Image (cartoon, grey):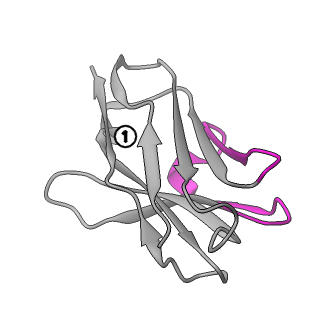
Amino acid sequence: QVQLVESGGGLVQTGGSLRLSCAASQGTAHTYIMAWFRQAPGKEREHVADINWNGRTVYSDFVKGRFAISRDGAKTTVYLQMSSLKPEDTAVYYCASGAVSGRYDYWGQGTQVTVSS
């Protein structure tokens, strides 16, 4: 069983930056693909960005040029550097991981990001 622990959320003003981290507890098992999703109040959970074992990244259009996903050398921690934050980025951000692309077997508990206008 993989546990994903997120950290780094908080309150920031419009235009500010935050860095989220997510650490997997069981080494590299089920961390071939790691991703960030978010869910705003009253909305469905949506994909933000993902990164695979080879470092290939995919971003949703609404964060391109503002957010950057990366992972550490051990491939057990994934980061999301968020810049130029907007109020519409306010959401609970979830980390997810899986053994194959497109399938996420494990999810973190989420970390709140609030962007004030």
Is 98 located above or below residue 117 in the figure? below
Q: Residue at x 63, y 48 (%)?
A: 78
Find the magenta span and give its range. Answer: 51-74
Q: Amino acid at mark 1?
A: Asp
Quadrant, the C terminus = top left
User: In the picture, residue 82 is in which quadrant?
Assistant: top right
Rendering quarter of residue 65: top right
Q: Is residue 84 magenta?
A: no
Q: Which residue is mark 1?
A: 89
The foreground one among 62 and 21 is: 21
Q: How many numbered marks does the figure carry?
A: 1
Q: Secondary structure at mark 1?
A: helix
Nearest to the observer: residue 108 or residue 65: 108
Q: From the viewer's perspective, is residue 20 above or below residue 32?
A: above
Q: Judge whether 97 appears above or below 85 on screen.
A: below
**Which residue is depicted at the point 67% across and 54% down?**
76
**Residue 102 point in image, percent of width and height:** 59, 82
